[in-house]
Image (spheres, rainbow, N blue to C red):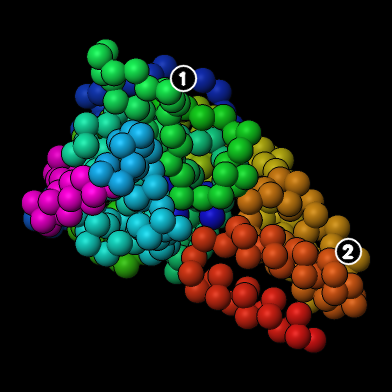
Amino acid sequence: MLSRLLGAVLLLLFCGCSSTPVPSKMALGSLFQDNQFKEVGNIPEPAELFALPPEAVQLLRGAYSRGALMSNQELAHEWLADYIHADKGGFRYQDNYTRTAAETFHDRAGNCMSLVILAAAMAQQLGIEVEFRDVEVPPVWDRQGAFYLVNGHINLKLYPPKNNHVFHVTERSILVDFLPERAVRSYKVNKISQGTVVAMYYNNAAAEALINENWDLAYGLLKKSLQQQSLFIPALNSLAVLYRARGMEQMAERVYRYALTLEPENMTTLYNLAVMLSSQDRLDEWAEVHKVLELARIRNPYYYYDMAQQAYMDHQYDEALSWYRRAIEKADYRHEFYFGLSRTYWAKGDSDRAKSNLQKALALAGDGEQKKRYQAKLHAMEGH
């Protein structure tokens, strides 16, 4: 599925508000609370995120040299695209935690952010130009312990080497994405800088630290993220969530208000603020943002999915099918939506449609364990 914990922001839904002036960068410094957290020393510097150890560089260049001998027509970016992907014996997608390039190379697996950073690091070693791209996919929700996360997605393009003395038959760039192409097709794409990718990395790692209640590490990572990109809204939201988790509600509200001066209609920020206002019984203020939150709720595919799940549990299968289809209209990349259709059709005795939708779920499942479960269910269906 879409990038796991990429731009992860905690506790969200959506809303909007009026525009206000953009604050100066000086205001950001007042939002940090160094005296409330212990300094941690194990946070990698930005350059370290993309650094590969000498043995990894040697392995990479050796593999490339062997590949070049076997096919002198293949350009470096074409070879690297093949080398990275799991179906070529390279690296596999694994949705667990965010790694540096060196860690991902060693483990031969990583989540979407980790694999993009690794691909960029290897491209740098081979002199390949890259372009980082933020894909504006619909929000994808996940729950981890006491927190809700929303996941975004990034990928990157590899460009052919520039050599004025050599004519290449192909000048095409190659998209490197660790999701099925159909999962991200037709969505708007924005080119982003490496600095933004670095800020995303720190925010992802901070979200993981928050889930594990490692408050000091989360704070250090979020400060690092905002030092890279001072206007990075996801990191501001995560910082406010951290403050709330530590009982620092006044500081949390200051961060939310600051974030809204930067992006007045950021729905994540407004939902988080609404949750806090509700918990403080500031109901008039809460009601203003909740009006828009309710409108956004019906745009969230997981609203329809939850309704479908409830209908299925109530044995209202026709109603469940309708809700699942509406969820798929909003997000046709989610494997669990197709699995919901599959088991509902199976409950209705329509084995052909049950198998067809389970095959779609299987094709979209990115995690190895999930694929195994779907394969086992499909095998059981076919043997029935």
Q: Residue at coordinates 38% horizontally, 60% vertically from top-left? A: 89
The residue identified by callout 2 is: 319
Q: Nearer the viewer, residue 44 or 127?
A: 127
The residue identified by callout 1 is: 20
In which quadrant of the rendered view does residue 295 lie? top right
Q: In the figure, 195 relative to 106: above or below? A: above
Q: In the figure, 8 relative to 87: above or below? A: above
Q: Position of residue 23 (x, y in %)?
A: 33, 21
Which sits earlier in the primary sequence, circle 1 or circle 2? 1
Local crowd at mark 1 within 10 Å, few (<14), some, or many (≥20)? Answer: few
The answer, for residue 252, to whether it is visible in the render is no
The answer, for residue 377, to whether it is visible in the render is yes
Left or right: residue 290 compared with residue 172: right
Left or right: residue 54 compared with residue 141: left
Q: Position of residue 193 (x, y in %)?
A: 32, 28
In the rendered structure, does residue 66 fall within the stretch colored magenta? Answer: yes
Q: In the figure, 313 relative to 365: above or below? A: below
| Badge 1 amino acid | Thr
In the rendered structure, does residue 150 fall within the stretch colored magenta? Answer: no
Q: How many marks?
A: 2
Disc 2 is placed on an element classified as helix
Q: Residue at coordinates 57% horizontally, 44% vertically from top-left? A: 181
Disc nearest the viewer among 1 and 2:
2
| Badge 2 amino acid | Glu
Q: Identify the magenta region.
A: 42-67
Q: Are marks 1 and 2 in contact (CB under 8 Å)?
A: no
User: What's the mark number on residue 184?
Assistant: none
Q: Nearer the viewer, residue 52 or 222?
A: 52
Local crowd at mark 2 within 10 Å, few (<14), some, or many (≥20)? Answer: some
